[in-house]
Image (spheres, grey):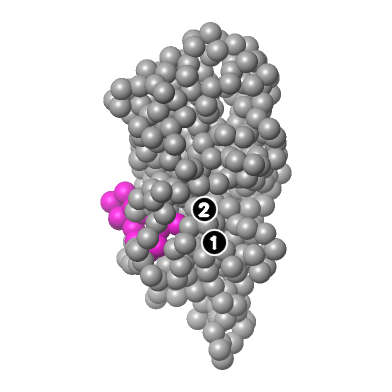
């Protein structure tokens, strides 16, 4: 289901996520902590994502531990900074599998970084939960590799439909991160856009560390697109839109949901105005589970949450339920219990259940957004090309 100003999500699950600090009479969790391991970026170019994760994690832990924890024990996490670098995720995986306190691992941020470590977790029998890992092959390493992220095989056809059918893009130039995630996402996007009747006039890859895109953008400009689509993260997308405008590319721009962060608007400045994206989470979505989460987040942090706050929050709430239902804390038991949980309250999904065959969740909602007056807002449904 898509949310925009014309079609604001109505109905659906009335089950709100329990976001109170604790229920009346509930004892604060005590005793030996239960640990989740987190592999992700706290420094480097993707550090903002790690900071957003921690806010979501901490809000969820406040609620879980304030309501008695996991059978009376507090739930905590150990966060190892990897900068989302595949070499570092491998080292962290070795550390986590050797730490018997850790019952499951969350992360890493990017699919390539996570997938580099997946064989280690699989061999050791420690569940790896890539909650921002949308690469279609992420969960294919084995039965200890799970995700509640929408696969790019599903997401990019939705992006293509948004760009072509709803925004009216006809001659699209695609710029993408030249990583496994970026190339795979681009391939799914291009295939779907062509099937919908659009012409893809240029595809250009770039490396994560690149800062100067002007020569690439000149080639794109010369292909005479009527629109751009970015398969990017927020930092590189901000640079791309700024340099595109400087290069004379003033066509409409849409981007993958990975740009949805206040940092994109901050770094992109005036060039971010009018950029379209979609998101699995938007704080103005009226669903009860979203609004209760937004209110609790504002109370703790005095600001609105974004998608990455909600992904992290959802994931810890999920593992709270898994750990409460698990008959013991053996790593294999945690994996088996995750496969069985049903209808876990979720900001992103309303209710989350897993397909044991794919080890992913189905049924995410999406909001269609545009940057307007320096903030992400719901798109009004008006096409931008003729």
In this rendering, position of residue 233 left or right of residue 286: right
Q: Is residue 302 above or below residue 201?
A: below
Residue 97 colored magenta? no
Give the camera-side residue of 344 and 98.
Answer: 344
Numbered label tally: 2
Q: Is residue 224 above or below residue 191?
A: above
In percent of width and height, residue 60 lies at 57, 67
In this rendering, position of residue 321 left or right of residue 88: left
Q: Quadrant of residue 34?
A: bottom right
Circles 1 and 2, Cβ within 8 Å, touching? The answer is no
Query: Which residue position is annotated with label 1?
Result: 313
Q: At x 60% / y 69%, what residue is drawn?
A: 296
For the record, the magenta segment spans 348-362
Q: At x 40% / y 74%, what residue is drawn?
A: 325
Q: Is residue 208 above or below residue 220?
A: below
Q: Element under label 1?
A: helix
Residue 354 colored magenta? yes
Q: Element under label 2?
A: loop
Toward the bottom, the furthest residue is: 25
Give the camera-side residue of 304 and 113.
Answer: 304
Q: Give the CA distance from mark 1 to mark 2.
A: 14 Å
Give the camera-side residue of 20 and 108.
Answer: 20
Q: Mark 2 or mark 1, which is nearer the start of the sequence?
A: 2
**Which numbered dot is residue 282?**
2
Q: At x 61% / y 72%, what residue is drawn?
A: 62
| Mark 1 or 2: the one toward you | 2
Q: Quadrant of residue 221?
A: top right
Query: In the rendered image, is residue 101 in sight?
Result: no
Give the class, few, some or many, for how many residues have Cα within 10 Å of label 1's Cα (few <14, many ≥20). many
In percent of width and height, residue 279 lies at 48, 46
Query: In the rendered image, is residue 309 in sight?
Result: yes
């Amino acid at each position: 289901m898509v949310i925009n100003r014309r079609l604001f999500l109505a109905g659906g699950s009335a089950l709100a996520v329990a976001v109170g600090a604790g229920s009346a009479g509930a004892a604060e969790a005590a005793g030996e902590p239960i640990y989740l391991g987190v592999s992700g970026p706290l420094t480097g170019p993707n550090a903002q994502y790690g900071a957003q994760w921690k806010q979501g994690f901490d809000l969820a832990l406040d609620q879980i531990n304030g309501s008695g924890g996991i059978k009376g024990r507090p739930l905590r996490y150990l966060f190892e900074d990897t900068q989302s670098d595949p070499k570092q995720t491998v080292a962290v995986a070795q550390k986590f599998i050797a730490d018997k306190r850790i019952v499951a691992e969350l992360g890493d941020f990017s699919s390539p970084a996570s997938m580099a470590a997946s064989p280690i977790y699989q061999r050791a029998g420690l569940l790896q939960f890539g909650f921002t890992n949308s690469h279609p092959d992420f969960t294919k390493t084995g039965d200890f590799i799970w995700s509640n992220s929408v696969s790019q095989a599903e997401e990019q056809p939705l992006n293509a439909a948004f760009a072509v059918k709803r925004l009216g893009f006809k001659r699209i130039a695609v710029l993408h991160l030249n990583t496994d995630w970026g190339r795979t996402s681009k391939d799914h996007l291009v295939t779907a856009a062509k099937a919908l009747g659009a012409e893809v006039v240029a595809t250009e890859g770039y490396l994560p560390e690149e800062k100067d895109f002007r020569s690439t953008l000149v080639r794109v400009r010369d292909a005479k697109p009527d629109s751009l689509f970015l398969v990017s993260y927020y930092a590189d997308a901000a640079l791309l839109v700024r340099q595109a405008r400087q290069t004379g590319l003033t066509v409409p721009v849409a981007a993958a949901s990975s740009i949805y962060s206040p940092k994109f608007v901050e770094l992109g400045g005036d060039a971010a105005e009018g950029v379209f994206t979609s998101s699995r989470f938007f704080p103005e979505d009226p669903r009860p589970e979203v609004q209760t989460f937004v209110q609790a987040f504002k109370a703790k942090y005095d600001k609105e949450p974004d998608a990455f706050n909600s992904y992290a929050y959802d994931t810890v709430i999920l593992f709270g339920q898994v750990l409460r239902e698990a008959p013991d804390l053996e790593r294999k038991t945690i994996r088996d219990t995750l496969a069985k949980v049903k209808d876990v309250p979720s900001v992103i999904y309303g209710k989350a259940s897993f397909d044991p065959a794919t080890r992913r969740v189905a049924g995410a909602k999406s909001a269609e957004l545009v940057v307007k007056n320096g903030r992400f807002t719901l798109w009004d449904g008006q096409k931008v090309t003729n």
